[in-house]
Image: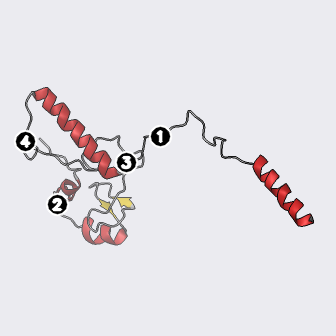
Amino acid sequence: MDGLDRIEFLKQVAAQNDVSGLRFKQSTWHKHLKRNKNAKQLISDEWKRLTNTKEREEGEPEDPDQNRTRLSYFNVQAYPSSKPAKKYCDVTGLKAHYKAPNTGLRFHNSEVYSLIIKPMAPGAEQAYLKLRGDHFVLK
């Protein structure tokens, strides 16, 4: 008989602990619709926005294949980097530690300077500076 009383007691406790009528979520809760986009989706959305504004300005739709500029990391406008630009040797392409005072050429070590830059003919250094975009033209 002791076993039947225990079962009845457990049934009563289970009936008191019934949670089927309780709400676990708030009634004002709703699923958020915002989701993250990957880089490809962001670029395509920006491209669509740019082409739509261009069409509105011109008044007529433009052929999408004609004069199309693909967006990339290089043609998106951004602020210049706050880090200093890396400097490379004009002759070897290695990291430049030094700069020649008379020519302005950058070089990696003293061997490059003594063998190549020091005996260089006048005016030849302008070709190296032109490649770097740091040349000047005398008028």
Mark 3 neighbour density, 10 Å: few (under 14) some (14–19) many (20 or more): few
- Color style of the picture: secondary structure
Count of all numbered marks drawn on residues in the image: 4
Quadrant location, the C terminus: top left
Q: Residue 32 carries which label?
A: 1
Disc 4 residue type (three-letter) = Asp
Q: Which mark is residue 124?
A: 2
Residue at 43 percent across and 41 percent down: it is 34
Q: Which of 43 and 27 is in front in this view?
A: 27
Residue 2: percent from left, percent from top = 92, 65
Q: Which of 25 and 87 is in front in this view?
A: 25
First in sequence, mark 2 or 4: give its number.
Answer: 4
For mark 4, give the secondary structure. Answer: loop
Residue 1: percent from left, percent from top = 92, 65
Disc 2 residue type (three-letter) = Ala
Q: In this view, does 67 lie above or below 127?
A: above
- The span from disc 3 to disc 4 (Cα, nearest Å) is 27 Å
Residue at 35 percent across and 43 percent down: it is 80
Disc 3 residue type (three-letter) = Lys
Q: Are marks 3 and 4 in contact (CB under 8 Å)?
A: no
First in sequence, mark 2 or 3: give its number.
Answer: 3
Q: Mark 3 points at which residue?
A: 37
Residue at 18 percent across and 54 percent down: it is 130
Q: Name the residue under label 4.
A: 63
Q: Nearer the viewer, mark 1 or mark 3?
A: 1
Q: Nearer the viewer, residue 66 or 48?
A: 48
Query: Residue 137 appears in which quarter of the rendering?
Result: top left
First in sequence, mark 3 or 4: give its number.
Answer: 3
